[in-house]
Image: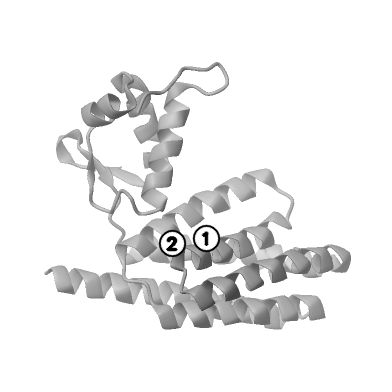
């Protein structure tokens, strides 16, 4: 895979974007060791842009350093999942508060949310897990975008990348996916009604259940491997 240098697209940026996508989409699995030499050979670049890409991914929490300076795709632990979902709950709760406080904006955002709900319906019907995951991601990103803060959007995207990685570490629950999707439609209805308390209660239940499912599946996977 040869990369062409560009003043608008430095080599390290292309390397980090490619590796991030592979990790988030499950092509590179948790625990997989990443060799600087092998990656440099694959991308046909020196080790410098590879090292910079790995440094950025380490800051994002997608890779981790082991003894002997080995780098691998991060292996999540229950505490990691709890911290990520705690941050996510804080971000989305504040976004919903601000959204409901602006009824005109809420109405416009709800129209977009309903599109993602329909996309999720279609993905469920086709048993398309990737399509459902994408609809779910778009739904929650749209809520956070309502705050109108680019830095918050970027932070939320980083957090959601971690969640995507965690899902590839565990078995996916079809029952939970369907229930979680149904709750999206309920949340849109509550936001349209301007019911802040009920919206936040449902959001917290939604995220708490998602966190619990991931932790349970992670522990089940570890027991199976053991």
- Give how far across and how far down residue 225 sits, in percent: 14, 68
Q: Quadrant of residue 211?
A: bottom left
33 relative to 169, above or below: above
Q: Residue furthest left?
A: 226
- Rendered-image quadrant of the C terminus: bottom left
Residue at x 45% of width, y 30% of height: 14
Q: Residue furthest right?
A: 104
Q: From the viewer's side, name the closer residue of 127 and 181.
A: 127
Left or right of 121 in this view: 211 = left
Query: Circle 2 sits in a helix, a strand or a loop, which is it?
Result: helix
In contact (CB < 8 Å): disc 1 and disc 2: yes
Left or right of 215 in this view: 137 = right
Query: Circle 1 sits in a helix, a strand or a loop, which is it?
Result: helix
Residue at x 16% of width, y 73% of height: 224
Q: From the viewer's side, name the closer residue of 60 and 25.
A: 25
Label 1: which residue?
A: 87
- Give how far across and how far down residue 13 sits, in percent: 47, 29
Label 2: which residue?
A: 83
Q: Quadrant of residue 113?
A: bottom right
Left or right of 133 in this view: 44 = left
Q: Residues within 10 Å of mark 1 (few under 14, many from 20)?
A: some
Residue at x 37% of width, y 24% of height: 2
Residue at x 50% of width, y 80% of height: 178
């Amino acid at each position: 895979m040869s990369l062409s240098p560009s003043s608008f697209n430095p080599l390290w940026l292309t390397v980090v974007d490619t590796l991030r996508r592979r990790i988030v989409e499950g092509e590179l699995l948790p625990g997989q060791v990443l060799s600087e030499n092998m990656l440099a050979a694959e991308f046909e670049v020196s080790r410098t842009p590879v090292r910079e890409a790995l440094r950025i991914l380490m800051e994002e929490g997608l890779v981790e350093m082991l003894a002997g300076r080995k780098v691998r795709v991060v292996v999540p632990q229950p505490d990691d999942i709890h911290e990520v979902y705690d941050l996510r709950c804080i971000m989305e709760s504040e976004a919903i508060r601000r959204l409901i406080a602006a009824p005109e904006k809420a109405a416009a955002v709800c129209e977009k949310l309903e599109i993602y709900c329909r996309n999720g319906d279609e993905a469920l019907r086709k048993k398309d897990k990737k399509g459902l995951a994408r609809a779910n991601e778009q739904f929650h990103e749209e809520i956070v975008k309502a705050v109108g803060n680019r830095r918050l959007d970027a932070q939320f995207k980083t957090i959601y990348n971690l969640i995507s990685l965690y899902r590839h570490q565990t078995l996916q629950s079809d029952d939970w996916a369907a229930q979680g999707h149904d709750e999206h439609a309920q949340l849109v209805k509550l936001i349209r009604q301007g019911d802040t308390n009920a919206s936040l209660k449902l959001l917290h239940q939604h995220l708490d259940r998602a966190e619990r499912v991931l932790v349970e599946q992670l522990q089940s996977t570890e027991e199976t491997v053991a």
